[in-house]
Amino acid sequence: MLHTVPAGTVLFEQGDTPNFQIVVMSGSVQLFGRSTSGREVLVEVVSPPDLIIPAAVVTGAPYLMRARVPEPSTFLLIQARTFRDLVASDLSLANSLIGSLSTQFRRMVRQIKNLKLRSAVQRIGCYLLTLSERQGTPEKAVLPYEKNLIASELGITRESFSRVLASLEKHGIRIDGQTIWIDDAERLAKECVPDPLIDDRELGFVLGD
């Protein structure tokens, strides 16, 4: 069934057992991890068309993350048991699921490499370049949600995020609230060193010698 929810809706909590396979049709879903002490970080944002944590649905295991909807969104809900039965009997669906799981696995590996191999400056600079390309506006990047959430997704504090943004102003950006103007993309790229094996796609910047 199709299900439309308002912004702020919590789809499920960390530790819940899946009742449905949720397919994002429009809007987006933020996935959060929470420690036993209560600290929470944004792990990933899922955009359409994509499945929400199919690994948990297929195995019947508890969710490892909490899902919250940051904007009005529409989902296709398929009963978890029905979905598992269909995957077992329908080769086409099973192949599609393998493709989805493979894409999600590669996305997670890119994220881990980004967190472990790069400095905060490199992470934020490449995030801005990737965001501007995805938004189709090479001269600017509009931050899609609160800076504290972006900071947690990039593995830094809100304060560090602000400090790094300020330090990047000498490398070709200007800060205007949620809009980051990119006045010199090549200069920013030289500072943060984009990598097609980490970033979502190969960024169109040729670094000079």
Image: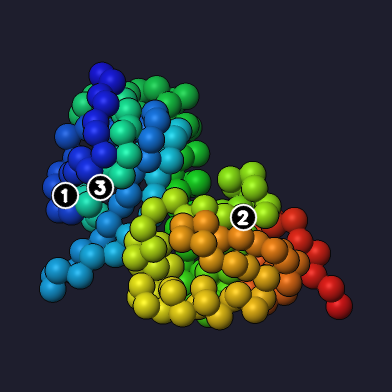
Residue 59's x, y, as percent? 25, 44
Q: Is residue 26 above or below residue 36?
A: above
The quarter of the picture where residue 57 lies is: top left
Which of the two discs, 3 and 2, labels the residue nearer the N terminus?
3
Cα separation, mark 1 vs mark 2, equals 35 Å
Residue 206's x, y, as percent? 80, 64
Which of the two discs, 1 and 2, labels the residue nearer the N terminus?
1
Residue, disc 3: 67
Cα separation, mark 3 vs mark 2, equals 29 Å
Q: Is residue 39 visible?
A: yes
Instruction: For mark 2, give the secondary structure.
Output: strand
Amino acid at the residue labelled 2: Lys
Nearer the observer, 160 or 76: 160
Q: Is residue 78 visible?
A: no
**Which is more foreground, mark 1 or mark 2?**
2
Q: Residue at x 39, y 22 (%)?
A: 90
Q: Residue at x 52, y 53 (%)?
A: 142
Amino acid at the residue labelled 3: Ala
Residue, disc 1: 13
Residue extending farthest to the right is 209
Circle 1/circle 2 CB separation < 8 Å: no
Q: Residue at x 20, y 40 (%)?
A: 9
Residue 152's x, y, as percent? 35, 67
Residue, disc 2: 140
Residue extending farthest to the top is 1
Local crowd size for mark 3, using a 10 Å CA cut-off: few (<14), some (14–19), many (≥20): many
